[in-house]
Image (cartoon, rainbow, N blue to C red):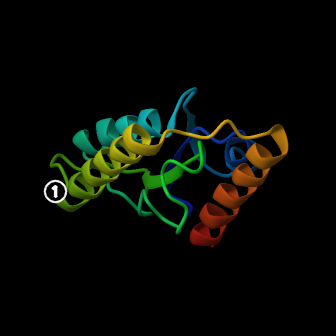
Amino acid sequence: MKEAIIITNNPMSRDKLGNEYKVDFIEGATTNVYTKVRDYIHKGHKLLTHPLMSSIKPNETPYRTVVISKDNDSTVDIKSLGYIEEALHTTEKFLKNYGLPNWSKQILEDFQLIDYDLINHALV
């Protein structure tokens, strides 16, 4: 999956994937990542990984990495748009209802590794 763009707020994903892929690094929350992905989809890109990949609830980790197509069409992929809108809605609902824990530095590094590992395996 060499023809892809990585959108992430995970420093580990940025650092480890930046030599092989175009990485759009987002300084911000998961919702900011999803909003950026939605912007790309509106420009004709397609999702290549599901935005809610993994069994980690959206309010449990502050990191998310999403892969989209490098090429874009002149039309919006309705399936991709539906997936990203649902991910954004679900994440906002979980954050509103449960908040995001104040994790220690070590736990945050563990979540970076989990997020990176999931995407890295999806790219292989």
Question: Which residue is situated farthest in the right direction here?
Answer: 106
Asked if residue 46 is positioned above or below residue 43 in the image, the reply reads below
* Lateral position of residue 122 relative to residue 84, left or right: right
In the picture of the structure, the residue carrying the numbered disc 1 is: 78
Q: Which residue is depicted at the point 75% across and 56% down?
A: 113
Q: Quadrant of the C terminus?
A: bottom right
Height in image: 13 above or below 114?
Answer: above
| Badge 1 amino acid | Ile
- x and y percentages locating residue 15 in the rendered image: 75, 42
Which residue does the image show at 59% across and 67% down from the upper left?
A: 123
Whether residue 121 sits left or right of residue 65 in the image: it is right
Q: Residue furthest top?
A: 27
Say few, some or many: other residues with alpha carbon within 10 Å of mark 1 (under 14 / 14 to 19 / 20 or more): few
| Figure quadrant of residue 77 | bottom left
* Left or right: 124 as drawn, with respect to 103: left
Residue shown at 33%/51% (left/top)? 90
**Residue at image x 54%, y 28%?**
28
Q: Nearer the viewer, residue 29 or 43?
A: 29
Secondary structure of the residue carrying tag 1 is helix
In x, y percent, where is residue 121?
64, 71
